[in-house]
Image (spheres, rainbow, N blue to C red):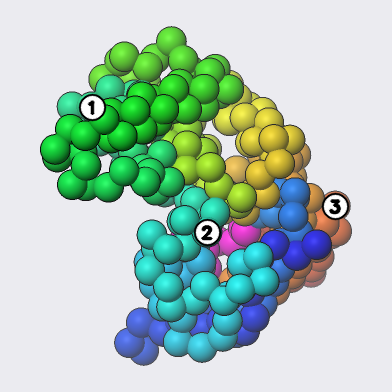
Amino acid sequence: MVLLDVENISKRFGGLLAIKDVSFSVATGSIKAVIGPNGAGKTTLFNLLSGLLLPDAGTIAFKGEPIHGRPPYQIATRGLARTFQHIKLFSNMTAIENVMVGCHVRSRAGFLAGMLHLPRAGQEEKEIRGRSRDVMDFLGIASLAGSEATSLSYGQQRTIELARALAADPVMLLLDEPAAGLNMRETADIARLILRVRDRGITVLIVEHDMSLVMNISDEIVVLSSGEKIADDKPAAIQKKPDVIRVYLGEDDA
């Protein structure tokens, strides 16, 4: 079953066509990767999917409903959450407080109830804290709950950002270079966590430069070059495609 369906989307910045007529789909329960050289349009694509940018042409459907043109918070409430290439944790907040921010996309009490300290707001805050701790425990970082988030190691911060996205209770997760800046051990750890997330029933779309991680965990891979899709296939087939070898893996033409 198709969960995300992208049809012929394009995005232009002035004279630069960053995304050109790109189409692909993501099946429910799968891990799909988007790869390509720097400047290929990967992050622009993610910004289009999450509502940070509007496509100039084309459609994006999630769970069978169009989401292009909707603001990011509406897309998030429909079950599409994301992380960012550059870590965006809140300083002077603990790890669990950062994770709790992700839960508020599902909160019901409202701003006024919180300001007036109404009982329903206090009860919901307790529930949010409990749910956040459950997510952190699932990812193996519950012991970090009370630590100041930005004082932790880079790898731990990456995992907290993943926990914050999961706290939104997504159906699908967009991961923008989750292994960026990580060493080999930390990369292996994040790969295991992504597989656990998938096994929990959450569909994953990942942008990543680490080819070993991509090849090891992905069910399918989309390859972009200069804003255009040049391949969309299973990992074993992607590795053999001449266009991919030439523009991404760096082999000279014979």
The quadrant in which residue 98 appears is top left
Residue at the spot of label 3: 236
Percent from the top left, x then y, of residue 209?
57, 49
Mark 2–mark 1 distance (CA, rounded to whole Å): 27 Å
Closest to the observer: 45 or 128?
A: 128
- In the displayed structure image, the side of residue 219 where residue 119 appears, left or right: left
> Which comes before the other along the chain, label 3 or label 1?
1
Closest to the observer: 246 or 34?
A: 34
Residues under numbered marks 3 and 2 in contact, where contact means CB atoms less than 8 Å apart: no
Q: Residue at x 62, y 59 (%)?
A: 34
Residue at the spot of label 1: 93
As helix, strand or loop, the secondary structure at mark 2 comes to loop
Residue at the outermost left position: 116
Let me know if residue 98 appears in the view: no
Q: In the rendered structure, which amino acid carries the disc numbered 3?
A: Ala
Q: Residue at x 65, y 65 (%)?
A: 63
Q: Is residue 236 covered in magenta?
A: no
Residue at the spot of label 2: 78
Q: Residue at x 21, y 34 (%)?
A: 118
